[in-house]
Each structure stands twice: as C-alpha cells, then as structure tokens.
Image (cartoon, helix red, strand yellow):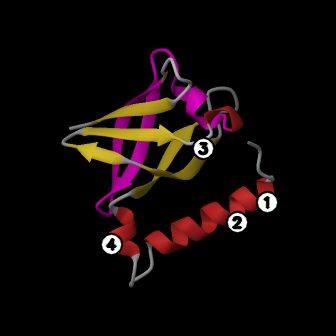
Amino acid sequence: MWFPRRFVNGFNGRVVALRSSPRFGRAVSRYLTVVTYTGRRSGRVFSTPVGYRRVGDVVTIGVQFPDAKKWWRNFLGEGGPISLELDGVERGGHAVARRDERGRVSLTVRLDS
C-alpha cells in the first residue's frame, strides 16, 4: 500500500500535535511516541510517530505496511541508535529490526540506562 507523501506528512503532523494536546496528550502518549534516528545513507536526522509497547527497558514497535516504508531498514542487521520520547523525556536506545516469516516487521529497542 502506498500513500502520497503529502498525506503522510499531514497525518504525522496531526499525530504529533495530538500527543502534545492538553486534553488528549497523556492518553495518546501511552501508545504513540516519536522516534528520532539518523539515516544510514543520508546522515540526515529524521523523526516519525509510531505506536509502541513498553515492558521495562524494552520497547517494541510494530511497523505497519513495512513494504511501503523505508525508515525501519536503518535498523536491520546489527541495528543502530535511536531515541524515543517516553513519559515526556527523550530516551536513547539501540534498535534492531526483524521481519518474521509472515512478512511482519518489528523493532526491538533496548533503552539506555
């Protein structure tokens, strides 16, 4: 599935705004975060909102429509550094992406101490 860049950017902007809203921000932030990473080829810094689950110092991010997205490929193999906004604080960690036998992609992030 492919979405026009303009649509994606508009949607992501609204999600980020919703996270910071006084009325809904706290509830939305329990399930959505913004990840920031450096592109492996470009060296540019990118941020994108994602859904997540957290258990202790391990965060799992499921990538929806992975074949239509490229950002998660920065974390294949050995993985790489990533930062996430959790509980209003920027947290660093190391992310590794894996694709299962059904084609689903998830990132496992081990947060820095």
Instruction: Tell which residue pokes out farthest to the front in this image.
Output: 102
Q: Secondary structure at mark 4?
A: helix
Lower sequence index among marks 1 and 3: 1
What separation in Å lies between label 1 and label 2 (alpha carbons)?
Answer: 6 Å
What separation in Å lies between label 4 and label 3 (alpha carbons)?
Answer: 26 Å
For mark 2, what is the residue? 10
Lower sequence index among marks 1 and 4: 1
- Magenta residues span 69-98
For mark 3, what is the residue? 45
Give the amino acid at mark 3: Val
What separation in Å lies between label 2 and label 4 (alpha carbons)?
Answer: 21 Å
Give the amino acid at mark 1: Arg
What separation in Å lies between label 2 and label 3 (alpha carbons)?
Answer: 19 Å
Residue 92 magenta-highlighted: yes
Q: Secondary structure at mark 2?
A: helix
* Relative vertical location of residue 102 with respect to residue 32 in this rendering, above or below: above
For mark 1, what is the residue? 6
Give the amino acid at mark 4: Arg
- Whole-percent x, y for residue 39 in the image: 62, 34
Residue at image point 62% right, 27% down: 40
* Relative vertical location of residue 45 with respect to residue 5 in this rendering, above or below: above
